[in-house]
Amino acid sequence: MQLYDGGRAPNPRRVRMFLAEKGIDIPKVPVDLAKMEQAGDAFKALNPLQRVPVLVLDDGTPIAESMAICRYFEALHPEPNLFGRDPKEIALIEMWIRRVELNFYSPVSTVFRHLHPAMAEREVPQIPAWGEANKSKALAFLALLDFELGKRKFVAGDRFTVADIVAAITTDFMRVAKLEVPADMKNIHRWFNEISARPAFAA
């Protein structure tokens, strides 16, 4: 199998961090997003949405979407467990993945796509007002997460899970979108410093 990777883009980073936490190493095929290689015919045959990452199995089956790829490897390699050990934990982790993706990653991504100069030729049209509007959406969710992290050590419970990967990669992506975590969100800073110190975060 091969993983079509996209460098520092957040979704490929999710998968690489997940694999590193699992101790899994598979061949990677770099996709140069700056050169728009994801828009080429060869890549579109794997993923018509032209997004990375894509896992191609040995039988040729392509699996796109970062969480789908992570779930595939969780099924193959159940330990260390990152998606939940029992129905309650599985549901809580899934709940927080959805919350982070819809209320945090999506707004941060929108800010980046509609305000960053590097996206001017790709996000057509860029709508700066929509980018500005999503800044408050991202920060509002971050305030909620800061409150929740005052009650427990990790995003979805008392141990590190894939929900922390999704949230931490998004928090790091804020820098690219020119957003800052407010200084008074002490719980976010405590949690992010711990997650970003894990060796897998640099994968």
Image (spheres, rainbow, N blue to C red):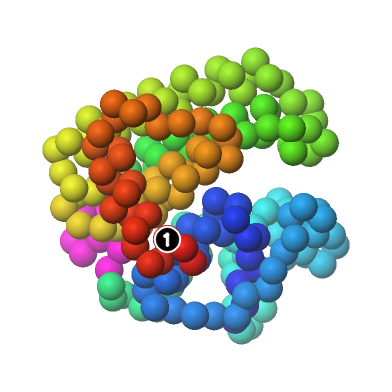
Please name whichever residue, 1 or 155, is drawn nearer the observer in this view of the structure: 155
Residue range corresponding to the magenta coloring: 81-91
Q: Is residue 202 above or below residue 59?
A: above
Which kind of residue does numbered mark 1 sit on? Answer: Phe
| Residue that protrudes farthest toward the front in the picture | 183
Q: Which residue is mark 1?
A: 201
The quadrant the N terminus occupies is bottom right
- Where residue 109 sits in the image (x, y, percent)? 57, 37
Q: Quadrant of residue 41?
A: bottom right
- Where residue 17 sits in the image (x, y, percent)? 44, 64
Residue occupying the point 56% across, 59% down: 12
Q: Is residue 127 left or right of residue 83?
A: right
Residue occupying the point 17% across, 36% down: 150
Q: Is residue 191 left or right of residue 71?
A: left
Q: Quadrant of residue 143?
A: top left
Q: Is residue 46 left or right of residue 12?
A: right
* Residue 123 makes an appearance in the image: no
Q: Is residue 74 above or below residue 64?
A: below
Please name whichever residue, 193 or 107, is drawn nearer the observer in this view of the structure: 193
- Where residue 107 sits in the image (x, y, percent)? 52, 31
Residue occupying the point 20% across, 57% down: 159
